Image: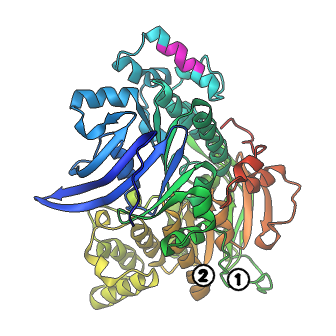
Amino acid sequence: MTVSFYPDNAVVSVDNLQVCAINHGVETELVSGISFSVRKGEVLALIGESGSGKTTIAMALMGYARQGCRVTAGKVQVAGSDVSALSPAQLRAFRGDNVAYIAQSAAASFNPGMKIIDQVTEPVLIHGKMSKAQAREKAIGLFKELALPDPETIGQRYPHQVSGGQLQRLMTAMALMADPQVIILDEPTTALDVTTQVEVLKLFRKIVSTRKMTAIYVSHDLAVVAQMADQIMVLQRGKIVEYGPAAQLLSHARQPYTLQLMDAARQVMRPGGWSRDHGDVHPLLEVRDLCAGYGPRNSEGIPKIRISENIQLRLWKGQAVGIIGESGSGKTTLAQAIAGINPAWSGHLLFNHHYISRDLGQRSVRELQQIQYVFQMADTALNPAHTVTAILSRPLQYFFKLRGAALEQRISELLDLVRLPDTVRHRKPASLSGGQKQRVNLARALAANPEIIICDEVTSALDTVVAAAILDLIADLRRRFNLSVLFISHDMHAIRAVCDDIVVMQQGRIVTQIAREDYAKPSSELYFERLKRAVPELRQGWLDEHQDVVKTGVTA
């Protein structure tokens, strides 16, 4: 797609940008033919699936390319500077003065061994912009502006002592210390739960508006982008698919890929075949009075940090139950306690109406086989040194003693189940996409022929199109194998898509449980109503209509 280049009055101007990866002297295009301009006070959203070139373009605005990559063509002008013509020393000054970057993971961006105030003030001190006293005073002023709790003292804490939403605000304060003209927001709300996401979105929009900043917002979520952007650029495989004013593109998208992104952002129910008239006498899994936590245990076996308290839960054969709540609500603690990974200190677990040990190490091979766990981050769940064949072979050999041709045939069947080509069996995780890795992660759980799979935030790290495909797959597996699913998520869209019942957790306790078909009915549980209202819709103006959505229990 060809896009006109309009540099007049633009703070950011990009003309025919091309970035290539160089491997053994061979250049491979990552992005090409990229042209756009953004004026003062405007927000341009770069949207597309993983690998579409969003972050590559955003990084080029800072004069940066990943290792092994370089800008091979085009012109980039930001805040009056020709970025491609700057020397290394000029680039450092440019980055310190004119452009700031807010990363997706605030937790990974902060040094856990340094106090927050020292990290927030470090950039302006390195660039010699102000004295230490001036920097500290300005940081505290920003903490107040960003509505952080205890602005005078929060800087004395370490990163692990504040919430995810607070860390994102603190990273924003760091970015604003030098009063940049341009701010780049790279998936800044992807890792946040829904209510925190709303608060942070409001914050970003306020900052851009009041400071008349120019912003580049990188995202894969069109519903979020609809609340932020003046212009939207849709990218696929490093090229522009569609580009225009946000209102026009959201209401009159023309390209099939843009329409696919929009479809993925909308709520779609995926029936799994379970009926409330199932006729079963006993639930497949029953949780009674379960209490779990972390840390050293006292003489009574009670952990230092108590998370989940007195949990009661039932999961029927073929049913999917979703567990939702904000960060720190106890969702994953409960899931790991059921799996026995982090044994509960009190309560009972029943599988098929028989008691099973709370400790994974004390369960029988048969019990281990029946409950399988699919971890959130396939990147860390899959051994990077092993091929897909080796990864899938282990459970098949352990549970079924498969060898030779029978083993190879079963691996092929598993890959077919999760809709992967047989050719991936010889590849290692690093050569797979995010969605492919999550499918291998799921295939490994299915290798045990379980009756229950526990899916822990399995779509949270995926873009919307890939996540939708994973949800389709889970629903299909339920229908084909009458599989029971415990689905942990902070994404209400995903929960509603695949789950028959929705369990809501807050501060370690279940506060309500409803059937999916009753979702739209008013609830007396105010916390659940806030969660529902915090799910962004694919239309402009939604955020303005939901100014009352606030995080409860803790400050975001």
Q: Residue at x 50, y 28 (%)?
A: 176
Left or right of 431 in this view: 243:
right
Q: Earlier in the sequence, mark 2 or mark 1?
A: 1
Which residue position is annotated with label 2? 478
Q: Residue at x 53, y 17 (%)?
A: 138
Query: How dense is the environment of label 2, judged by Cα within 10 Å: few (below 14), some, or many (20 and up)?
Result: many
- Stretch of the chain drawn in magenta: 135-141
Amino acid at dot 2 = Arg
Spot occupied by residue 173 in the image (x, y as percentages of width and height): 52, 28
Spot occupied by residue 41 in the image (x, y as percentages of width and height): 55, 38
Query: How dense is the environment of label 1, judged by Cα within 10 Å: few (below 14), some, or many (20 and up)?
Result: some
Spot occupied by residue 325 in the image (x, y as percentages of width and height): 68, 53
Q: Residue at x 60, y 66 (%)?
A: 265
Which residue position is annotated with label 1? 274
- Please tell me whether residue 143 belongs to the stretch shown in magenta: no
Specify the quadrant of the image occupied by residue 328: top right
In the image, residue 486 above or below residue 324: below
Q: CA separation, marks 2 and 1?
A: 8 Å
Tag 1's secondary structure?
Answer: loop
Q: Residue at x 45, y 20 (%)?
A: 121
Q: Is residue 456 visible?
A: yes
Whether tag 2 and tag 1 are in contact, CB under 8 A, the answer is yes
Specify the quadrant of the image occupied by residue 274: bottom right
Q: Nearer the viewer, residue 220 or 414?
A: 220
Q: How many marks?
A: 2
Q: Residue furthest left?
A: 25
Tag 2's secondary structure?
Answer: helix
Q: Residue furthest front?
A: 8
**Magenta stretch prevailing secondary structure:** helix
